[in-house]
């Protein structure tokens, strides 16, 4: 008897819709391929000034883990700051006011939406509320959108002196041959030898370097705080990501499976911990 896919697919969607929350409870310690629980993972990342917790932006369980990491580090007596890819520097004053409890939620939602317009606010809401309720500073990390867009379309050489003044000092997006090779091997991009591909690489590394610069600057001003960095998995990984641009500043990394990185392909030069998802697609 044949069963029509038109019947199977809606049924599967119904099943997955009503499954209980798929909470992430463990991670692979990449160094020795051992599975550990989230509490152990938090213990093992608590001795450095910067902790990256990567995400797929629209995955609620990743944001739950990020909040667990924040709570776990605070319970260990750490003074925290939260570095977020989701905000640009123009919003820093609003972020400071939010963490001080001086901004109503409806106004802060507008600040968020002006920065991170394609991902619903509710996915980060518990993190924002935790930061406000515990007066944890939030650091705007991302490069200006208009600069990133310009570089991705026209390349680094298109930036004017006025454009460059919008970036931290000494930040550039010169791309090495090694980075180009990494991008070719790691991402499904067509025409990997043309100028458009180079421009995409320049924009990617520009964002990494701007975010790394802002993390370093904050650490120099507030060395007593552990900076928990929330960013997409491609930016949070070490190879080709923000950590590679931090210089000598120590860090640990936690990321979920993302395209090209899963339990089979992951290496120590990518991350310290890989989250184990009950229903990973990668």
Image: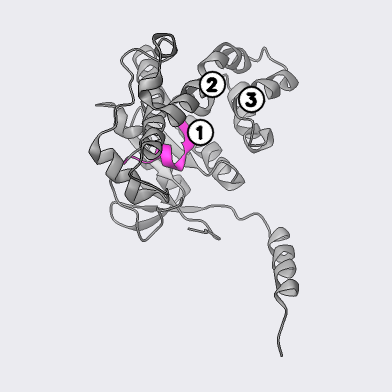
> Going from the N terminus, do you reach mark 2 or mark 1 first?
1
Could you say which quadrant of the image residue 223 lies in?
Answer: top left
Where does label 1 land, which residue? 70
Query: Colour scheme used in the picture?
Result: one colour
Could you say which quadrant of the image residue 162 lies in?
Answer: top left
Quadrant position of the N terminus in the picture: bottom right
Evaluate if marks 1 and 3 touch, with contact meaning CB atoms under 8 Å apart. no
Query: Is 26 above or below relative to 72?
Result: below
Disc 2 from disc 3: Cα separation = 17 Å
Count residues near mark 2 (Cα–Cα under 10 Å), then give few for <14, some for 14-19, many for 20+.
Answer: many
Where does label 3 land, which residue? 112
Could you tell me if residue 102 is visible in this image?
yes
Nearest-to-viewer mark from 2 and 3: 3
Q: Secondary structure at mark 2?
A: loop
Where does label 2 land, which residue? 136
Side of 83 where 108 appears, left or right:
right
Q: Nearer the viewer, residue 267 or 193?
A: 193
Q: Position of residue 30 (x, y in %)?
A: 33, 52
Side of 140 where 4 appears, left or right:
right
> Going from the N terminus, do you reach mark 1 or mark 3 first?
1
Q: Residue at x 52, y 59 (%)?
A: 281
Q: Secondary structure at mark 1?
A: helix
Q: Secondary structure at mark 3?
A: helix
Query: Is 218 above or below relative to 211?
Result: above
Disc 1 from disc 3: Cα separation = 20 Å
Q: Nearer the viewer, residue 62 or 141?
A: 141
Count residues near mark 3 (Cα–Cα under 10 Å), then give few for <14, some for 14-19, many for 20+.
Answer: many
Q: Residue at x 47, y 53 (%)?
A: 26
Q: Position of residue 23 (x, y in %)?
A: 58, 52
**Highlighted magenta segment, given as a residue range:** 228-239
Evaluate if marks 2 and 1 touch, with contact meaning CB atoms under 8 Å apart. yes
């Amino acid at each position: 008897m044949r069963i029509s896919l038109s019947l199977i697919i809606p049924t599967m969607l119904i099943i997955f819709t009503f499954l209980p929350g798929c909470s992430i409870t463990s991670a692979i310690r990449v160094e020795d391929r051992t599975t550990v629980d989230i509490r152990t993972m938090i213990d093992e990342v608590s001795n450095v000034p910067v902790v990256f917790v990567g995400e797929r932006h629209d995955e609620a369980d990743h944001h739950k883990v990020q909040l667990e990491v924040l709570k776990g580090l605070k319970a260990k007596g750490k003074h925290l700051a939260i570095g977020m890819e989701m905000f640009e520097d123009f919003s820093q004053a609003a972020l400071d006011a939010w963490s001080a409890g001086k901004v109503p939620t409806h106004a802060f939602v507008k600040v968020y939406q002006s920065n991170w317009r394609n991902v619903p606010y509710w996915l980060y809401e518990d993190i924002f509320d935790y930061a406000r309720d515990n007066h944890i500073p939030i650091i705007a990390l991302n490069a200006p959108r208009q600069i990133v867009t310009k570089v991705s379309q026209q390349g680094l050489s298109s930036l004017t002196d006025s454009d460059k003044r919008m970036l931290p000092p000494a930040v550039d997006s010169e791309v090495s041959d090694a980075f180009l090779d990494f991008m070719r091997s790691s991402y499904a991009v067509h025409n990997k030898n043309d100028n458009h591909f180079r421009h995409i690489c320049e924009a990617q590394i520009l964002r990494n370097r701007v975010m790394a610069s802002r993390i370093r600057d904050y650490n120099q001003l507030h060395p007593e705080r552990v900076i928990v960095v929330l960013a997409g998995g491609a930016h949070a990984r070490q190879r080709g990501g923000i950590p590679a641009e931090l210089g000598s500043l120590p860090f640990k990394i936690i990321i979920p499976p993302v395209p090209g990185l899963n339990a089979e392909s992951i290496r120590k030069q990518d991350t310290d911990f890989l989250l184990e998802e009950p229903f990973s697609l990668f």
